[in-house]
Image (cartoon, rainbow, N blue to C red):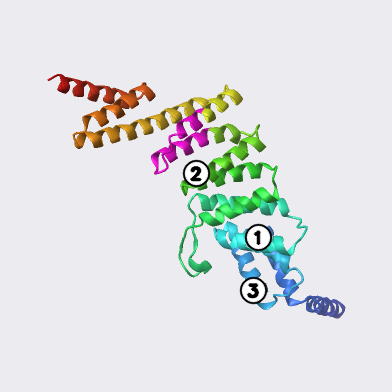
């Protein structure tokens, strides 16, 4: 019995001695790995922050940023997640988790594009009020530069284009969509990009940038779409968008005619009505323009 008691004491002492040989920062790091495996994200975040504060020169601090970033992502602190992923890439010239990191970055950009906001001034204590669209655009560019021929690049270019169109940066939006078509012609986002280009032209027509050449540009895009993807059902949607574009221009001409009518300048108004009939004969506005011309003719006869 005494013998077993002594053996127990010796085993306990050896356990304590072996633990004492492990540096505290290494024990903390081991806990990070354990909680990461168990998906205890709050624990990973808390212990990572502790290591960063107490042991900023830890030999595995660069690896720590990866685990810290993933925990922040799952806790929906996307701005911090992106920050730590960037640090991880900067400190690891050949990171073993490179593609996975880029996937996380893309996912963060998508969250920002869809409306997620970041903390004011980057402080966690502040509410999430800051729009993150600019950050999303930067991340999309980073993804494209990192994996130029990967599917993530196609999705990043498309996401960037949609966001640019939202900010009314129409030219760069169209350039990004054309790059999707050029670089990824067999990807499903290629026909989607043709359709989106038509929508961007329509957005331009509905904005202050109503350039008369938009109709021709939209027509060229639609014809290319028909030629490259003749059986794609989205061609029909693109045709509807093109017709809406024509309708937007027709409405603008009609508004100009109404402007002159209010000022009793019927001859000028008549010119706009006739322009609608000659340029957009199949539009709904053309029917209204025809009716107005008939009224003008009757008034002249009287």
Dot 3: few (<14), some (14–19), or many (≥20) neighbours within 10 Å?
Answer: some
Residue that numbered label 3 is attached to = 50
Q: Which of the marked residues, 1 or 2, is nearer the chain's N terminus? A: 1
Rendered residue at 77%/60% (across/down): 93
Q: Nearer the viewer, residue 86 or 175?
A: 175
- Displayed quadrant of residue 266: top left
Instruction: For marks 1 and 2, give the CA distance.
Output: 30 Å
Q: Residue furthest right?
A: 3
Rendered residue at 50%/68% (across/down): 121
Q: Position of residue 179 (x, y in %)?
A: 62, 40
Picture quarter with the C terminus: top left
Residue that numbered label 2 is attached to = 170
Q: Which of the marked residues, 2 or 3, is nearer the chain's N terminus? A: 3
Q: Position of residue 31 (x, y in %)?
A: 70, 67
Contact? badges 3 and 1 (CB < 8 Å): no
Say whether residue 256 is visible.
yes
Q: Is residue 202 magenta?
A: yes
Q: Determine whether, in the image, residue 194 is placed left or right of residue 208.
A: right
Q: Closer to the camera: disc 3 or disc 1?
A: 1
């Amino acid at each position: 019995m005494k013998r077993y008691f002594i053996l127990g004491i010796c085993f306990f002492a050896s356990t304590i001695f072996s633990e004492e040989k492990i540096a505290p920062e290494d024990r903390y790091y081991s806990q990070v790995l354990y909680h990461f495996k168990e998906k205890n994200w709050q624990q990973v975040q808390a212990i990572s922050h502790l290591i960063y504060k107490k042991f900023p020169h830890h030999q595995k601090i660069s690896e720590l940023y990866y685990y810290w970033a993933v925990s922040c992502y799952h806790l929906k602190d996307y701005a911090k997640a992106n920050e730590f992923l960037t640090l991880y890439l900067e400190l690891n010239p050949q990171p073993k988790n490179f593609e996975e990191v880029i996937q996380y970055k893309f996912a963060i950009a998508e969250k920002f594009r869809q409306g997620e906001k970041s903390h004011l001034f980057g402080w966690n204590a502040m509410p999430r009020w800051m729009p993150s669209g600019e950050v999303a655009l930067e991340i999309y560019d980073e993804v494209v530069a990192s994996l130029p021929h990967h599917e993530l690049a196609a999705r990043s270019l498309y996401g960037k284009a949609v966001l640019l169109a939202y900010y009314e940066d129409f030219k760069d939006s169209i350039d990004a969509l054309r790059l999707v078509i050029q670089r990824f012609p067999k990807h499903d986002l290629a026909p989607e990009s043709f359709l989106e280009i038509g929508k961007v032209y329509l957005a331009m027509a509905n904005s202050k940038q109503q350039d008369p050449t938009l109709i021709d540009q939209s027509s060229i895009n639609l014809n290319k779409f028909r030629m490259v993807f003749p059986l794609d059902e989205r061609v029909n949607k693109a045709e509807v968008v093109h017709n809406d574009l024509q309708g937007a221009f027709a409405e603008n001409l009609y508004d100009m005619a109404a402007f002159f009518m209010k000022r009793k300048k019927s001859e000028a108004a008549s010119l706009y009505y006739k322009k609608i009939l000659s340029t957009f004969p199949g539009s709904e506005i053309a029917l209204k323009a025809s009716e107005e011309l008939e009224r003008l003719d009757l008034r002249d006869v009287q």
